[in-house]
Image (cartoon, grey):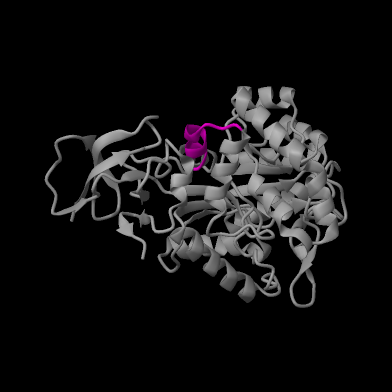
Amino acid sequence: MATLYKNCNLFDAVNEKIQGNAWLLVDDQGIITKTGTGKTPQAEKVVDLQGQYVMPGLINAHTHIMLDPTLKVQADSTETAATVQALHNLRTLLKSGVTAIRDCGAVFDVDVQLMKLMQQGLVDGPEIVPSGRPMSIVGGHGDFTVGQDHDQNWGHLVNSKAEMRQAVREEFKHGAKNIKVMATGGVMSPTDRVDDTELSLEELQTAVSEAHSKHMTVASHAQGNRGIELSLQAGVDSIEHGIFLDEAQADFMVEHNVCLVPTLNASQCIADAGDLVPDYMQKKNSQIIKTFYKNVGMAIKKGVKVVVGTDAGTPLSMFDRSTTREMDLLVKAGATTLQALLGATRYAAELLQIADHCGSLTAGKEANFLVLQNNPLADVTAVNQVDKQVYQHGKLVK
């Protein structure tokens, strides 16, 4: 049975303006068959949206669904605990308006397993583009043990091109769609510095060549300048964080269509956390946060394609509000509302290689959309609406 959603103001993430008096025709499989303005087609069911604003469902390109951002639960203690936490976080994301995510590093490959269950219709939540376990080095960002007996490592610890090749192929075997590499140290790791260079150029090049040969993307955790440079030389698809990005690197990213996923939200959450997080984390974050905002603003001004990701699951980066907060922070860093909206919709879908079916509201795409009272193109905080309607596959999320 076809459903007509009529009388709305539409931001479809293709046209860069609001289309007034718009409508969407959705089939019984939750696929948009037609869109338009003015005169409406016939349909068995009609939903009058009463002049409200419609935009695509949000995409969060950097999450960690098996973590508890409240710090109350050690969610990686067992595979069962990680799975239960991930299911809770997925439900929270969907209710908040996020209809697709890329998970950027999950213990026990929980994200991969949940993607498979979701494809079988056994689990509800946003579509998952999983990365499985990330690629790190001994002592680097991502080298910490998990499990009740601390007998497993969160990431693959690689010490050569051969080990990187094997680790990428293992994640490919399991079903990962993206490979996460830890090119530098990080704010949240206790044993290194933000600008430490960790994976070598040869190791990064191996990760990229293996991933790209199997239709996977590569996301590089790269905070220090040298690690950003090596990641770009290796050919990664996105720079995650990019704290010490310089102008030449930004120009390279524009020329080669490399996305930046800043996760300003994660840094801001640490700044706001006070003594809820370890001293080393606060100290490192306080040393970089001003530079972080400045360089993200520079990248936006130069035209780097910025994609919304939040590091949801890390300390106080909540799944119910971090996505919209990141959009707001990007605007404060210098993005237009249009850039922020595209960063959470079309640009994100392109990076995640899911633009064939989501990220915009046009014929042939899934009917994943939000219904808002106010115009998000005029003020991005309109997306923060607590009681907004969320539709996934043409069905209202309860």
Main secondary structure found in the magenta portion: helix
Q: Is residue 132 above or below residue 357?
A: below
Quadrant containing the C terminus is bottom left
Relative to 137, is 209 on the left or the right? Answer: left
- One can see residue 235 in this view: no
Q: Nearer the viewer, residue 99 or 300?
A: 300
Residue 3 is situated, as x and y percent measured from the top left of the image, at 20, 52
For image coordinates 29% across by 39% down, the residue present is: 9
Residue 257: image quadrant is: top right
Task: Give, as a single range, the part of the protein colored magenta.
Answer: 334-344
Residue 295 is situated, as x and y percent measured from the top left of the image, at 71, 32
Q: Is residue 196 above or below residue 16?
A: below
Relative to 200, is 60 on the left or the right? Answer: left
Residue 283 is situated, as x and y percent measured from the top left of the image, at 84, 51
- One can see residue 131 in this view: yes
Residue 329: image quadrant is: top right
Q: Is residue 45 above or below residue 229?
A: below
Quadrant containing the N terminus is bottom left
Q: Is 343 one of the magenta-colored residues? A: yes
Q: Nearer the viewer, residue 123 or 369?
A: 369
Q: Nearer the viewer, residue 336 or 156?
A: 336
Relative to 6, is 189 on the left or the right? Answer: right
For image coordinates 84% across by 41% down, the residue present is: 195
Residue 362 is situated, as x and y percent measured from the top left of the image, at 32, 38
Number of numbered tags placed on the structure image: 0
Q: Is 262 one of the magenta-colored residues? A: no
Residue 65: image quadrant is: bottom right
For image coordinates 23% across by 35% down, the residue present is: 36
